[in-house]
Amino acid sequence: MHITTALTCSALGGGAITGIGSLPHVDPSAAVRLVAEFCPEIPFWPQLPQRAPGELMVEQALAPVADLLQPCEGRYGYQLARGDRAELLYRLSYGQAALTPDVAAGFFAFEEALAANAFPRAVALKGQIIGPLTLAAQIFVDEQPLLYDPEGLAVVRAYIERMARWQIMRLARWRSPVLLVLDEPYLALLASLNNTELLATVHGLTQALRASGALVSVHCCATLPDRTPPLALLCATGADVVSFDAYQRSEAFCADSIVRSFLAAGGVLAFGIIPTLRDLADVSLADLLTRWVVVSRGGDSQIALKDYTLITATCGLGLLSEEAARRSFQLARELAAAVGSNDL
């Protein structure tokens, strides 16, 4: 049996929901209590960007080299402002590759909750980190992102692996398996499987982390120009679980041969089907279930899609209100129960 079957709606009787990563709380303990309430089977440590800007996805990963960088003017990302390229790469290669309480308070509150046995029903513990392509695209040296610097990309990839292994090692003390998620919105910009070098970077990392004993997921909430999720790219990363925006045009993706092969091998789809909105008053359970059913009918009739389904929000909830985050999880729980009992 594929180990990921323990994560699915079918295996958990409709309880298969988890979070993408960020929550809007400023109190780490309150954030972890929300996780325990709504995600007891697949709990995650919460990133808290409203508590501190350093808890944002990019900034959290760049903390060890933050003193060398400054925000780019007129565009996204950070540029080298002090030192040189060699020092930057040396620090990423040999410097600290671990979370600290000042930029990841939720991680340490999560560990405290684990020590207090706050998640007795957990089948996996979820951690998350920015993916190497997305991080390398954010770091500029002489107006060039490290994404297009082969040595720089290799260094970033190795740095992310060290950070991911640190999380896996810490969380595995409490329960195995650990589900480690790479957040790679940049994948949507690849547009096709033809960019083999960049895709191989992600694939190599997923395989290295799987070899460490973790389950690996790749998340991409960005969509292709036609507003469809990059499912074929995600399924080609070698991940155990792929996480995507399923609220957009995802009705035909199951017809893709790569997606079918992924499911046939036991892979799990994390449907980001709860839209990340400040107001969910107009989003109904009936509408969400209809969207999921439409997707399931586009797939292989020999595969019961609910047996390979997780339910999540489309993206992190860190910039919403606590009330909106709670409503998002309530809808996710209701939908997971409906999917788990659906006979289609």
Image (spheres, rainbow, N blue to C red):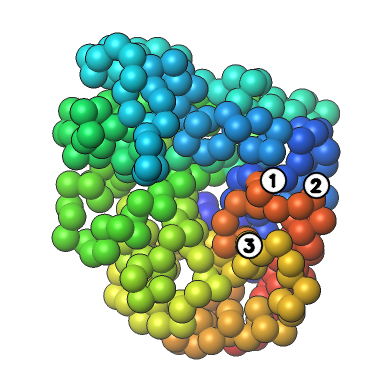
Residue 154 in the image: x percent, y percent?
24, 31
Would you say the residues marked 2 and 1 are in contact, meaning their CB atoms lie under 8 Å apart? yes
Which type of secondary structure does the marked residue at label 3 adopt? loop
Residues at marks 2 and 1, CA–CA distance in whole angstroms: 9 Å
Residue 50 in the image: x percent, y percent?
69, 38
Q: Which residue is mark 1?
A: 23
Point 38% across, 17% down: residue = 68
Q: Which residue is mark 3?
A: 276
The earlier-in-sequence mark between 3 and 1 is 1
The earlier-in-sequence mark between 2 and 1 is 1
User: Where is 292 relative to 310, above or below?
Assistant: below
Nearest to viewer (mark 2 / mark 1): 1
The earlier-in-sequence mark between 3 and 2 is 2
Q: Which residue is mark 2?
A: 34
Kindly indicate the quadrant of the structure image that contains residue 18: bottom right
Residues at marks 3 and 2, CA–CA distance in whole angstroms: 17 Å
Residue 100 is at least partly visible in this image: yes
Residue 193 in the image: x percent, y percent?
22, 61
